[in-house]
Amino acid sequence: MQREIRVYNCDGATLEYSITGTGTPILLFHGGHSSCHEEFGYLPLLTSGYSIITPSRAGYGRTSFIIDLGQACRIYKSLLDHLALEKVHVISVSAGGPTGIVFCSMFPERVTNFTLQCAVTKPWHSKEDKEYKMAMRIFKPGAERRTWKLLAKMSNQFPKLTCRLMTSSFSKLPFSKIQEQINDHFVEEFRKMNNRQRSYSGFIIDLEQTQRVYSKELAAIQVPTLIMHSQNDKSVSLSHPENARELVPQSEVVILDSWGHLIWIGKHAAEFNSALISFLSRLRN
């Protein structure tokens, strides 16, 4: 996949971002441990005539450490000004949910429609949770590079085993059931993911920002909103899409019977792509 990586400087902050494709613009806020190099779900959008602008969110890649989400969103809006983009479709993925929620509530005039994909929409891991404590140890700056280097090495040497071990953190299903939903590309997609992911200081920011309640911001979203989730998602529970559905005025929900959190891979990916592109095409710039 060809993409152009750029750096934009705004108000003393640095924003790394990528542009892929040349069609109708989508502003995509990636999930945790990702960056402007993300690939999940991109190809179907590109072949359907969309371009994708992906900022490395605050703390990820070369983007500055910005803890205040409102400040970060003002920089993302400035990027649209810089690119002379009046309106964009917005997609938020997983831990990138709060970023999209705040952006759409702050700048409704710049948003055509909004899609939440397996996204965090309310307080996530509390500081007492074992997941939070573990993440603070293995994904903090200074440790996260070693963590991802080890995962990449394991994935490259033992791709099937690593995939099997990791699916338990993404899905509520036993692996015997997950196997029924995977296709020939599944293991390779996992391997590639583990080779491109890094946390930098971004996931620590995510853990802080996902402590907040976003009810006011969700209720302020004025554009049509598609909420997509897997009923078997173990990483982000079904209470998150339910929360968004109750609060966003113009919302609709697609709950997939897919294997788990990574709805872009596996046998149900085609169903996911069809629903997303159908939604986007209703209000195409």
Image (tube, rainbow, N blue to C red):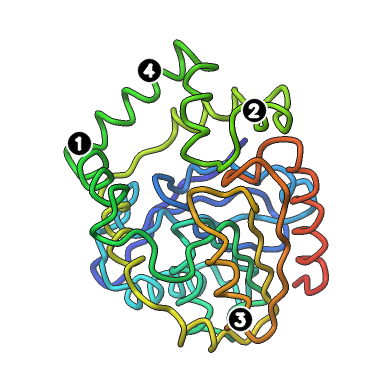
Residue under circle 3?
246
* Circle 2 SS class: helix
State which quadrant residue 7 falls in.
bottom left
- The nearer-to-camera label among 3 and 1 is 3
* Circle 1 SS class: loop
State which quadrant residue 139 falls in.
top left
**Residue 186: mark in rendering:** 2
Question: x and y percent of residue 135 in the render?
Answer: 28, 45
Question: x and y percent of residue 132 in the render?
Answer: 28, 52
Residues 243 and 48: in front is 243
Q: Amino acid at mark 2?
A: Phe
x 23%, y 68%: residue? 12
Label 1, residues with CA under 10 Å away: few <14, some 14-19, many ≥20:
some
Residue under circle 1?
143
* Circle 3 SS class: helix
x 52%, y 28%: residue? 192
The Cα atoms of the two marked residues, 3 and 1, are separated by 39 Å
Label 4, residues with CA under 10 Å away: few <14, some 14-19, many ≥20:
some
Residues 12 and 211: in front is 211
Q: Earlier in the sequence, mark 3 or mark 1?
A: 1
* Circle 4 SS class: helix
- Number of callouts: 4
- The nearer-to-camera label among 2 and 3 is 3
Residue under circle 4?
153
Residue 104 as seen in the image, left or right of residue 148: right
x 26%, y 65%: residue? 66
